[in-house]
Image: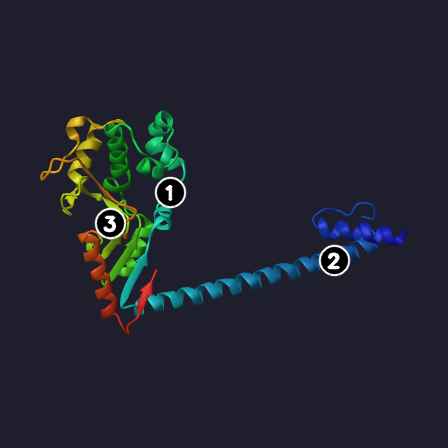
Amino acid sequence: MLDDTLRDAGEEVWLRVEQPIVGIHGSPLAECLGLLAAERRVCLERLVDDLIKQLILVHIVQMERTKEVVREADLVLADASNGFDMAEGLNIFRPDRHFMEAYGDFAQERGISSVLEGLARPWEDEQERWGFLARFAKTEWLGYEPSRAMQSLQKIIGTRPYFILTCNIDGRFARAGLDEKQALETEGTIQELSCSAGCSEERIDAEPVFAGMAKAGGMKVPEELLSTCKRCGAPLVPALDERRVLHPDLAFKERTARFSELLREAKGKNVLVL
């Protein structure tokens, strides 16, 4: 009987310290157990406080070490792809709030469930395809404002040599003011157009084309706004190619040559890889 009372009282104290002990409230045993529980709680609070202080100290040490590494870097290499876009609020894989706000009509009318699906979809209507591309260009490129993530990257780079490797096609690094020649976009970019017939490797500035299309609005681009190649008359298309690495164009070769040159120049120096 005493064992049961002790067990019940103990459970009540340890599990519900702030509540009165039922059945033996006010007894010497209850007061004793209450004092023990209070001491235990104080010890636990001190332990948690010490742990938090240690974690803060470790964080400060790590931050100082990170700052030191950044300060000593002679070259900054940034591998910034889909994760970087997500940090800026663009997730091309999911129908999140941003997608529904920007592309909700395409989702409702055409059943598109992500930005990636809209970009890769085999559209039957070319005007509608360009309608989605124009919406993407307007929302993710032309209307882009550098986020805290981009500003932090720019601050880390500072005045040092740098190079960016990315599979992102939205042209945000150049839009933020970084040198597009210092970035290798492995799957192409929405910033440029190319001949669909491949009559040349010339790249055409896409901004005036998409700006006009975005101004027209709607899900379909008027036929007269669709551009053609001045050389052969074939339709122009965004310079996007997920297999660009397998058959590199002139711009790709120039960027990879620049990347190799930077690595040679940085031999024996401090290279910061992000």
- The x and y percentages for residue 75 are 27, 66
Query: What amino acid is at disc 3?
Result: Ala
> Real-space Cα distance between discs 2 and 1?
54 Å
Circle 2 or circle 1, nearest the eye? 1
Cβ atoms under marks 2 and 1 closer than 8 Å = no
Q: Which residue is disc 1 drawn over?
A: 91
Considering every residue shown, the one lying at the far bottom of the view is 268
Using a 10 Å C-alpha cutoff, classify the residue at mark 1 as few (fewer than 14 neighbours), some (14 to 19) or many (20 or more): many
Q: Is residue 148 left or right of residue 237?
A: right
Residue corresponding to mark 3: 176
The C terminus, quarter of image:
bottom left
Front-most of residues 4 and 39? 4
Residue plotted at (72% across, 46% down): 19
Residue type (three-letter) at the residue carrying disc 2: Leu
Name the residue that disc number 2 marks: 35
Left-right relation of 210 to 165: left
| Secondary element type, mark 2 | helix
Question: Which residue is at 61% across, 62% downward?
Answer: 46
Mark 1 lies on a secondary structure that is loop
